[in-house]
Amino acid sequence: MLEVKNLSHIYMAGTPFQVTALKDVSLKVEKGEFIGIIGETGSGKSTLVQHFNGLLKPTSGDVLLGGENIWSGKISMRAIRSRVALLFQYPEHQLFEETVYKDVAFGPRNLGLSEKDVKERVCYALKLMGLDYKSYKDRSPFSLSGGEKRRVAMAGILAMKPEVIILDEPTAGMDPSGRRHLLKQIEKLHREENITVIMVTHNMDEVSRLADRLFVFSAGRLVLQGRPAEVFNSAKTIKEIGLELPVLSELLQKLRNSGKNIRTDLFSVEEVGREILEHYRRG
Amino acid sequence: MRAITLGHYLPGDSLLHKLDPRIKLLCLLVLIVTLFLVRTFWGFILFGAFIFIIFLIAKLPWRYFLRGLRPVLYIILFTLILHFLFTKGGKVYWRLGPLSVEEAGIYMGTFMTLRLILLVVTTLLITLTTSPISFADGIEFMLRPFRRLGIPGHEIAMMMTIALRFIPTLMEESDKIRKAQIARGADFETGNIFRRARNLVPLLVPLFVSAFRRADELAIAMEARCYQGGKGRTKMRELHTKPLDYFGLFTSFGMMLVILLGRV
């Protein structure tokens, strides 16, 4: 449903500060997928995702949403942004209203919904993020804890009922429990609300477990793509471009390289534990 | 990234880039004074030619000068029209009621416009070739004689440096917040001026919050490194004047003398 074709992006073209951020990238995201985008800092991931909802205009190439070129002028930008929501890194920095309610309502109000619908959306979004409507709606977003702020910011995006949500390092700077909690909620969104999720991240362990498919970027190019098992099988390429394997894949691949007949395409602690136990049981 | 060319730095390695910032500021001062000493069009031609040679030495793309002139375009137009319509004297070219365009008006209008344009171009030549940090160093030096009057030169320069240092950071931050709010359907581009001003709230509140947070973090970082102001402070980059610098200063004063003695 979301597709880019031969996309290139050059920042500040024609000045001495010119930087090529993306070079000839083509990829396709299907409805209902959970996509992981990985790559070193400065590899063009963030630039790429800003093209998905028209925040950046490609220097060359096309961005298609549901088969329609988003720059053709046939669909309004507002419509695109309500369908494809983007949450930047440290989204808590975008909070500005006096109350949680007003902040979450900002998006739906911009869509021109009636006050009744707005209220319904706010309720829905806060609930999805596991925040109790009654006890949070009148609090100031600036008085919340870091994790709560982030969930409010995310609710602000979800209140627009998007088909696709793009999350730029959603767990950056969070403590382990906050991280686990947030990831569970993202997983739930994907599963229960059938929202297409595109997650940009540096955390290989998280993304290998959650994503259906991965896109790997290096220096503005798409270098690898496929299911996590396929991508992390190219251990050499992954390490060459400055990334790491998920800890569990690293373990399984080391066991395999030492001659054990063991599967390497598992990404959760439970599965890997079972596989190793079974291997030793088999003898 | 748009109308901020005035005071924007373009890295390079021309002779002008290598000039000591203190000398450059002094030269700028001398040249501005010279510009106001010019009394005839011949003087402007002379001065213009001088500036053109420096422009060639600086190896800057001329687009930057056009872009730098854009913000002052209205002031220039305003001056021109005001003089054309209200300065009286000489031959009358056109008349409508109390308004008339007369010879002296055209002369003064063109004269002032040329002066303004040359002023901006001269300033741009210096600001485009001086990095903000060395600029602040230059200012600190120039303020040194005023220390007796209680003017804290070092502190002013430090404030300038910090302000300049944070312009790109805050620009980037505002760009990010703007995009984040646009992604939530915010509209910063349409509507009348009051509507637009109100629509800026979602941008300004987070920007202020983050500016205060950054200021706080910076203050703590400076405290942690025992920053105590200018007293007894040494410099990482000591400025040394070279023969080239004296040559630059000499040329600027030379230009001033030519204009003064030539009575042009």
Image (cartoon, rainbow, N blue to C red):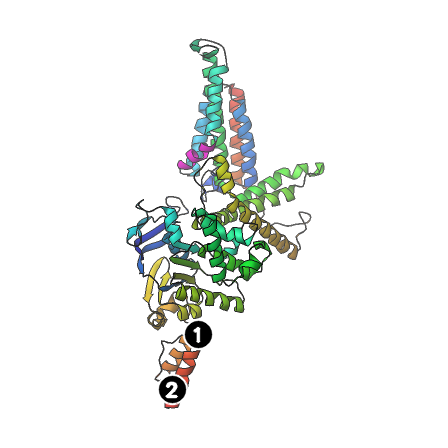
Picture disc at residue A194: none
Q: Secondary structure at mark 2?
A: helix
Residue B161 against residue A130 in the figure, above or below: above
Residues at circles 1 and 2 in contact by the CB criterion of under 8 Å: no
| Quadrant of res A235 | bottom left
Nearer to us in this view, B150 or A187: A187
- Secondary structure mainly formed by the magenta segment: helix
Boundaries of the magenta span? B62-71
Nearer to us in this view, A77 or A226: A77
Badge 2: residue crowd in 10 Å (few <14, some 14–19, many ≥20): some
Please name the amino acid that badge 2 sits on: His
Q: Position of residue B56 (x, y in %)?
A: 41, 35
Please name the amino acid that badge 1 sits on: Val
Write down the chain letter for disc 1: A
Query: In this rendering, does residue A186 appear at all?
Result: yes
Write down the chain letter for disc 2: A
Same subunit, tags 1 and 2: yes
Which numbered mark, 1 or 2, is in the foreground of this view? 2
Badge 1 is on which residue?
Answer: A247
Real-space CA distance between mark 1 and mark 2, rounded to the nearest whole angstrom: 19 Å
Nearer to us in this view, B29 or B103: B103
N-term mark: 1 or 2: 1
Badge 2 is on which residue?
Answer: A279
Q: Secondary structure at mark 1?
A: helix
Q: Is A201 within the magenta?
A: no
Q: Position of residue A68 (x, y in %)?
A: 29, 51
Q: Position of residue B253 (x, y in %)?
A: 54, 29
> Is B174 left, or right, of A3 in this rendering?
right
Query: In this rendering, does residue A43 appear at all?
Result: no
Kindly give the residue lying farthest to the front in the view shown.
A116
Residue A234 against residue A91 in the figure, above or below: below
Q: Position of residue A249 (x, y in %)?
A: 40, 75
